[in-house]
Each structure stands twice: as C-alpha cells, then as structure tokens.
Amino acid sequence: MIELLKVPSLLTVQDSGRFGYRKLGIPVAGAVDDVSARLANYLVGNPADAPVLEFLLAGPTIKFNVSAVFAVAGDVDLRLNGVPIEPWTSYWAKRGDILEVGTLKSGLYGYIAFAGGIKCRPLLGSCSTYPRAGLGRPLKAGERLNLGHAILTGRDGRHLPPELRPDYSAEEKTVRVVLGPDLDHFTEMGIETFLSEAYTVTPESDRMGYRLDGPAIEHSEKGADIVTDAVPPGAVQVPASGKPIVMLRDAQTTGGYAKIAVVAAADLPLVAQSRPGERLRFEAVSVEEAQELLRRRERMLAAIRKFLDGEMRAYRIRTGGEELIAFAKVEKE
C-alpha cells in the first residue's frame, strides 16, 4: 500500500467516469483531464481507465510501503527520496521510498498513476470520487491506499517526450464549440460577442463548472431560462447575468439556463486545465468537425500507447510549413 504523508490540496481517486446513470441524475465524474490521466496510466502499463490520483495544483507527499512503479503527469517538480526526478516518466519505487510532488507550473490538475492501479470498491461501476452524492470523498493526510497487483518488470523507464505531452501553458486558449441547442434565447449580437471576445476563468470554478467573466452575452426576448433539460459535460450555460458557465465532469445532469454552445469533447481538458485569471476564446465548429477532432485525438492516444509499449517509434515531419508528429511501426527481427 501507499501512505499519504502530506495532502496540501484537493486529492481524489478518479478513473474514466461513471457511465449509464445520467438518466438517474448521477453525473459522469472521472478525471477532468482524461488525456493526462490516460497518459499517466499508459506510462505504467495500465489500462486507460485504471484508477489514478488527481491533485489540484499542489501534489501530495507519498510513502511507499511496497515496491511499485509510478508516473506523474503534469508540469511539476518531483523528488524521490530527495533526489529530483522527471514527470511524464515511470519509476520503480522501493518499500520505504518517499515521493514528493510539487506545485504545477502550468495547468491546474495533475495525475499520479501506479502499476496495477489503485485498489478500490467500484460504486455504480466506477471508482471515481463524486463527494456531492457521497460517492467517495477527498483524501486526507494519514490515509493509506492499496494498490492493485501488477508485474512491475518493464513498466519503469518509460518516458513521454515533450512533443507528445499536452501543453496547457498558454494564458489564452482557443476552445472549439458546437453552437446550440438554445440559440433562439440569444440575439445575433449575443452570439457574436460569445465568439469574438475573450472570457476569463474566475476563482468561482471547480470540477462542476467554470464561471467565466467578460462581456455580457445578450439574450433574446425569450430570456435566460428554459424548461429544464439535459446538461452534458461541456455545455456552456448563460444565466441572466450574461456571463457563461462551462460545465465539467461533475456537472449536474439537468439545468434551466439557456445553452449557447457545447464544448467539443476533445477540448474539454483544455478548459479544465485553465487557471483562474487565464482566458478562453471560443471558435464555432460543426458537429462533424467536433467528431473528427475526437477521432483524431483517439488515434493519437492509441499511437502514443504503442510508442510507450515499444511497438511504434515517433519522429517529426514538416508538411505545408507545419511540424507534425508521425509514428511508424517498429519492425521486430
């Protein structure tokens, strides 16, 4: 097992989420940045949805009471027994070793994965923490967590190069959205404002949703309220104040504010990793374009998994003045 010696900020167990229960009012939950969580799992040889630790801004100090392979996803300083080590790299910790996770330099959430995952009892098919409904709770210093069984050999020493890591350092990010479904509740000027202005993430933001500040989005004569209907993760609600709220993984399943857009699933991690004070701009895309963005992301993640497993190699190519990452299958002798 591992022991949490220090927990300076919100620390929870998360996996890919709780699916099939939104009709009963139970949110998806799960890692708000599912890309970083999956990459952390890939680094230690886990399935994509194995339970990980998600920390907010500042990471915990962990004592290993058993040998384990671990990896930390995030732009953060790390020390193992006082010696600096690298994020986005898997290491073998021995019994008695102590891992210190610092404060993220960019982004808001970081992830710690362990080979074999974190052993827990699934609730409604998931180990994800959703405190509002009593589905798990935030972790505290002094607690111990059991790890799942895993063959450790070959899982350490994996490294994800910078060009394959998500980059959340920009203070202004462009987020792709599909407009609607309640566009009749907004004027043409309101829609234009939403798509042309920058909005700042406020401190009144959490895993449920990010409240944004900026120019008010004008409603039509129908106003800000609608008959309560479904609220998916990524929905952009606009209450009477005209200031948008982007819903995230812990969002309620229904709501009565008009929705001007829904964030493309591929860009949800970009929103979640934006700090208070950073800005978001919104760019409209079609449903088909949003679906292609997600397919492209999934192809990239599948290729990265094979790269980390030693089945593919990565190299840079330049096409049309743009530098891209390409993958090629490793030919075995």
Image: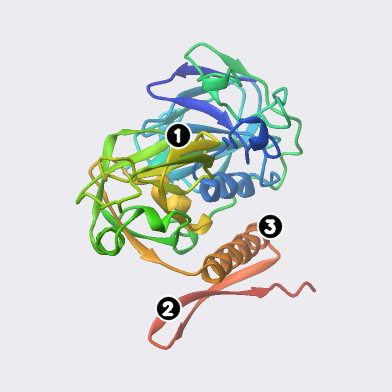
Instruction: Tell me, yes or no, whether the two marked residues, 1 and 3, touch with CB atoms within 8 Å.
Output: no
Q: Residue at x 66, y 36 (%)?
A: 23
**Colouring style:** rainbow
Q: Nearer the viewer, mark 1 or mark 3?
A: 1
Report the amino acid beneath label 3: Asp
Above/below status of 302 relative to 22: below
Instruction: Read off the residue under disc 2.
Output: 323
Q: Quadrant of residue 275?
A: top left
Q: Nearer the viewer, mark 2 or mark 3?
A: 2
Q: Nearer the viewer, mark 2 or mark 1?
A: 1
Q: CA distance from mark 2 to mark 3?
A: 24 Å
Q: Position of residue 200 (x, y in %)?
A: 24, 47
Above/below status of 209 relative to 304: above
Instruction: Read off the residue under disc 3.
Output: 309
Q: Is residue 332 left or right of residue 19?
A: right
Would you call the spot at circle 3 few (<14 residues within 10 Å), some (14-19), or many (20 or more)?
Answer: some
